[in-house]
Image (cartoon, helix red, strand yellow):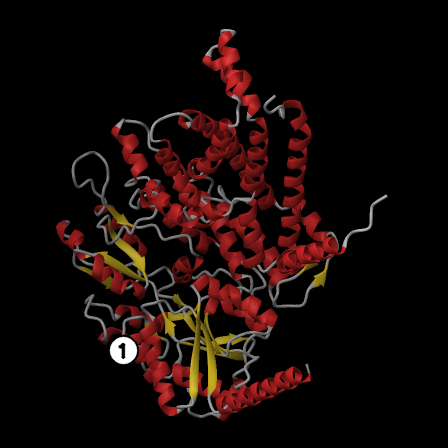
């Protein structure tokens, strides 16, 4: 019996010694955890930046924790509550405000002050919450007019120009809505109806001189006549002029690449899929101007550092490196994944892609942009926006004016309860 | 007076508890625990990001004034009324039909396959079936010159579309349960009835249906409990639209918890749903005495 006890004790002691030597050896290597939504074919793109960083810091290991886009943003909540946030967090700008207000991210202000190598003004927009910079964007985007050149040619119409207004858009859409096979039913439409996403309509609202919210988010301003004008225009396109297909035709389909619509409003991410799928020549033009000129909004995604990170200096070095001009052009621009969020490297987007001819329009439009408006309860705003506008825009029930009045009332209440 | 247990009995009981312990511990820690915690949570306002705030019965009061809640409740009741009666009756008819024919096993397999398929995968396929202009279903209707509804894109047809797909998916399991019950009906009852000159329909009404009534009760209770909690189809096929037509109550709970950061309110919604389902189940259980026949073979 005593022999057995001694044997057991020796084994335990040896195990402890072994483990501690292993751990001591492991302390040489540091691991940075990155929470992200890198999909399978993105992985190699993001790896470029990781490999480059390892060359400078050979003892750093990376642990990539990927989840699909929506799930990734959801789990941040749970991780924050449990104290298990990764060191580096990939995040879209519209998810930021509540997380930033809750203290999820490291405040970068003092790091930027101490470090002259970081040029914050080079970014097209900043991840800021009440004067506190909490992250850096890696991409930016604008909505532009994508059109089917073949359809324009067939009707002998001139391609869209930089001077187009929304009435030009309507006039041309009317001429491009046709019954091509003579069966009495329209099978080609001039335009798509933009999906009911507030982000999609915001550029057009701004171009009319309106905006969704007051600058300090004290009030919702969607009942402004200029905002109503924009939604009434798109409503009329479907239900009065019949130049866009109704939802029952559009559901689940990519109308542009299947050659069903002549014009669409899209961001630069369509370059790769459209080039692969479209069997006709197509090009990009500036988004038509509104009564207040050309005013657009932008948004995108970026990276931040968790406030709970155990390696703030290393995380800061990594963040600087990963969102540097050089890295962004290599990972984001040249690969065609998006437009880098830095003025100094935005050009790389056009050089990496052969089509379409005027793809630099997406970059040129950036000169007219500012960051989209993001209320705290962004997802609730998104939900209310759809609930208010779906009946009138998609099903032609009720009027645009009433829907927007009701939306304003609802949002005023929500803003007062959730905005910080 | 209970006799003193033998040492063997005590040891066996201890072994039983030891075997049960891992499952019980997990169940208490990961199911019962959070369940009880969520009752407490329903009296708070909690966004996970900020500390919880005690609000008493405020969440429950708010519920009564929340139009979206009543809409989602109505949508769910609509779904239950559409899926359960039709599904149960169809499953019974199918079971009758497949009880004594050739290639029985093949048919049963075919009807059971939707049940074991992932709801997510099935939803994606049906999205294409329901496509109004290019989908299978409307193509079929078009061939016969019948009207083509907008299905998932039409606020009036979206829920019927989800109902049809759900009936199709759940048919197999109820059918299998009925098949098993049918096997257990003593043949001499049918012989006796035939001698007395009963028609096929009378046989079904007076013998088959009462004899499978315990199974019917079970299927009804389980179907209603399950249907009240429908979520996958709303999440994948319609995202609760169009215009909130397919937002079911569990989908609404999900949105409140994970999109609007209102875990306290979502908890109160969840427990209200529990209360509703409980009431329905008790009603069914109590009314069962009136129509369920446990006679069995004599």
Above or below residue A59? Residue B44 is above
A307 vs A332, left or right, is right
- Asked if residue A374 can be seen in this view, the reply is no
**Residue A313 image offset from top left, x and y in percent:** 50, 89
Q: Nearer the viewer, residue B136 or A110?
A: B136
> Residue A317: which quarter of the image?
bottom left
- Asked if residue B272 can be seen in this view, the reply is yes
Q: In the image, what residue occupies the spot 47% across and 10% down?
A: B199
Above or below residue A18? Residue B183 is above
Q: How many marks?
A: 1
A179 vs B276, left or right, is left
A201 vs A188, left or right, is right
Quick one: quadrant of the C terminus of chain A? bottom right
**Residue B277 image offset from top left, x and y in percent:** 63, 40
Q: Which chain does the residue under circle 1 lie in?
A: A
The local crowd at label 1, few if under 14, some if 14 to 19, many if 20 or more residues have their Cα within 10 Å, is many
Above or below residue B37? Residue B64 is above
Mark 1, residue position: A348
The local secondary structure at tag 1 comes to helix
**Residue B74 image offset from top left, x and y in percent:** 57, 38
Above or below residue B274? Residue A333 is below
Q: In the image, what residue occupies the spot 53% across and 85% down?
A: A109
Q: In the image, what residue occupies the spot 40% across and 53% down?
A: A230
Q: Nearer the viewer, residue B267 or A339?
A: B267
A214 vs B110, left or right, is right
Quick one: quadrant of the N terminus of chain A? bottom right
**Residue B203 image offset from top left, x and y in percent:** 50, 15
Q: In the image, what residue occupies the spot 64% across and 85% down?
A: A9
């Amino acid at each position: 019996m005593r022999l057995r006890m001694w044997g057991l004790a020796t084994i335990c002691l040896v195990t402890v010694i072994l483990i501690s030597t292993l751990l001591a050896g492991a302390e040489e290597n540091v691991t940075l955890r990155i929470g992200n939504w890198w999909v399978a074919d993105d992985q190699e793109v993001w790896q470029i930046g990781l490999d480059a960083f390892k060359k400078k810091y050979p003892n750093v290991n990376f642990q990539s924790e990927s989840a699909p886009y929506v799930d990734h943003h959801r789990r941040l909540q749970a991780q924050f509550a449990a104290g298990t946030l990764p060191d580096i967090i990939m995040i879209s700008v519209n998810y930021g405000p509540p997380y930033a207000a809750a203290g999820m991210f490291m405040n970068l202000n003092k790091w930027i002050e101490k470090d002259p190598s970081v040029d914050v003004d080079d970014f097209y927009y900043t991840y800021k919450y009440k004067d506190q910079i909490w992250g850096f964007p890696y991409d930016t985007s604008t909505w532009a007019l994508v059109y089917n050149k073949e359809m324009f040619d067939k009707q002998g119409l001139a391609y869209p120009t930089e001077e187009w207004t929304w009435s030009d858009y309507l006039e041309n859409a009317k001429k491009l809505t046709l019954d091509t096979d003579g069966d009495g039913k329209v099978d080609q439409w001039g335009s798509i109806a933009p999906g009911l996403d507030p982000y999609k309509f915001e550029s057009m609202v701004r171009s009319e001189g309106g905006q969704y919210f007051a600058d300090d988010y004290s009030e919702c301003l969607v009942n402004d006549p200029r905002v109503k004008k924009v939604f009434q225009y798109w409503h009329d396109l479907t239900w009065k002029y019949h130049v866009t297909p109704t939802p029952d035709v559009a559901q689940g389909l990519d109308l542009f690449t299947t050659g069903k619509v002549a014009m669409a409003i899209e961001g630069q991410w369509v370059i790769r899929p459209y080039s692969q799928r479209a069997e006709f020549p197509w090009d990009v033009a500036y988004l038509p101007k509104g009564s207040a000129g050309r005013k657009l909004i932008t948004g995108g995604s970026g990276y931040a550092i968790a406030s709970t990170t155990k390696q703030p200096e290393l995380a800061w070095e990594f963040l600087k490196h990963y969102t540097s001009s050089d890295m962004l052009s290599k990972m984001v621009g040249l690969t065609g994944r998006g437009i880098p969020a830095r003025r100094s490297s935005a050009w790389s987007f056009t050089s990496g892609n052969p089509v379409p001819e005027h793809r630099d329009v997406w970059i040129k439009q950036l000169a007219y942009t500012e960051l989209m408006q993001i209320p705290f309860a962004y997802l609730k705003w998104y939900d209310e926006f759809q609930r208010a506008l779906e009946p009138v825009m998609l099903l032609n029930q009720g009027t645009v004016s009433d829907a927007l009045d009701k939306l304003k009332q609802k949002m005023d209440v929500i803003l007062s309860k959730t905005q910080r | 007076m209970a006799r003193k247990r033998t040492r063997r009995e005590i040891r066996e009981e201890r072994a039983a508890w030891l075997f049960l312990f891992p499952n019980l511990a997990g169940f208490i820690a990961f199911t019962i625990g959070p369940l009880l915690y969520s009752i407490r949570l329903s009296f708070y306002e909690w966004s996970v990001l900020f500390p919880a705030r005690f609000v008493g019965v405020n969440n429950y009061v708010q519920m009564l004034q929340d139009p979206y809640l009543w809409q989602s409740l109505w949508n769910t009741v609509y779904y239950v009324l559409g899926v359960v009666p039709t599904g149960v009756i169809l499953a019974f008819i199918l079971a009758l039909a497949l009880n004594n024919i050739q290639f029985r096993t093949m048919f049963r397999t075919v009807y059971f396959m939707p049940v074991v398929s992932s709801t997510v995968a099935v939803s994606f396929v049906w999205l294409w079936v329901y496509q109004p202009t290019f989908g299978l279903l409307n193509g079929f209707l078009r061939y016969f010159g019948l009207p083509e509804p907008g299905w998932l894109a039409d606020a009036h047809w979206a829920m019927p579309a989800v109902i049809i797909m759900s009936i199709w998916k759940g048919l197999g399991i109820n059918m299998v349960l009925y098949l098993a019950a049918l096997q257990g009906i003593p043949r001499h009852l049918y012989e006796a009835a035939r001698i007395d000159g009963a028609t096929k329909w009378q046989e079904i009404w007076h013998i088959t249906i009462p004899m499978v009534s315990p199974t019917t009760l079970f299927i009804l209770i389980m179907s209603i409990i399950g249907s009240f909690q429908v979520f996958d189809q709303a999440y994948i096929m319609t995202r609760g639209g169009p215009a909130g037509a397919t937002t079911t109550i569990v989908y609404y709970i999900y949105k409140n918890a994970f999109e609007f950061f209102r875990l306290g309110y979502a908890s109160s919604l969840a427990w209200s749903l529990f209360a509703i389902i409980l009431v329905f189940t008790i009603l069914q259980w109590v009314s069962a005495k009136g129509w369920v026949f446990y006679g069995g073979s004599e």
